[in-house]
Amino acid sequence: MSAAVSARASSRRNASPSRLANTEKDIAGEVLRFGGLSGAKLGLRFDRVVVRVLGRLRGFAEAQIPDGTTFLVTISAPILTPGKTAGALEHEIMAMALASGPLAERALTVHGNRVRVRRIRHAHGRKPKLIGFVHNPDAAPQPLLDLAERWLRAEAAD
């Protein structure tokens, strides 16, 4: 991951909405370039609600998740109850972080949104603790998760 994206991902407190939007777009852009894809082709969204929810989840993950763990999250749009959705996902992420054993991925519905959460354990380093995507309802989340995991593992190998 580029130093600029890493620095932005870890300095989320008191960030302006435009800066948060740029961080989400930068991380998604790096993952998609790695796979030779575009955000529009995959139906990704970056509106204000998306940026707010992903920003809250990223801030939570940076503060609560141990180094060496990254959560990949996909959420289907539209997010009609952003606060409740983010709160429920924070709870789910923490439960998965604390769980021992092989549970590494969950598919669930949170306040009407289809959600996938995948836990990736990797070597320590300046990797984001959360990579999130919000996609159109007709888009498949599995390719996003698989691509993000391949990107994260390739970055860890460098």
Image (spheres, grey):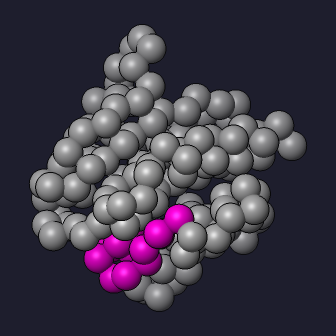
Seen in the image, is 113 located left or right of residue 6? left
Q: What is the quadrant of the C terminus in the image? A: top right
Front in this rendered view, residue 157 or 60: 157
Instruction: Say whether residue 45 is magenta.
Output: yes
The picture places residue 42, in percent across and down from the top left corner, at: 53, 65
Q: Main secondary structure of the magenta part?
A: helix
The picture places residue 115, in percent across and down from the top left corner, at: 31, 47
Residue furthest front in the image: 138
Q: Which residues are magenta?
A: 42-55
For the point 37% across and 82% down, the residue is: 47
Q: What is the quadrant of the N terminus in the image? A: bottom right
Q: Quadrant of residue 133?
A: bottom left
For the point 27% across and 50% down, the residue is: 114
For the point 59% across and 65% down, the residue is: 28
Front in this rendered view, residue 60 or 132: 132
Instruction: Say whether residue 36 is magenta.
Output: no
Residue 14 is at least partly visible in this image? no
Seen in the image, is 154 located left or right of residue 120? right
Q: Quadrant of residue 91?
A: top left
Seen in the image, is 73 located left or right of residue 67? left
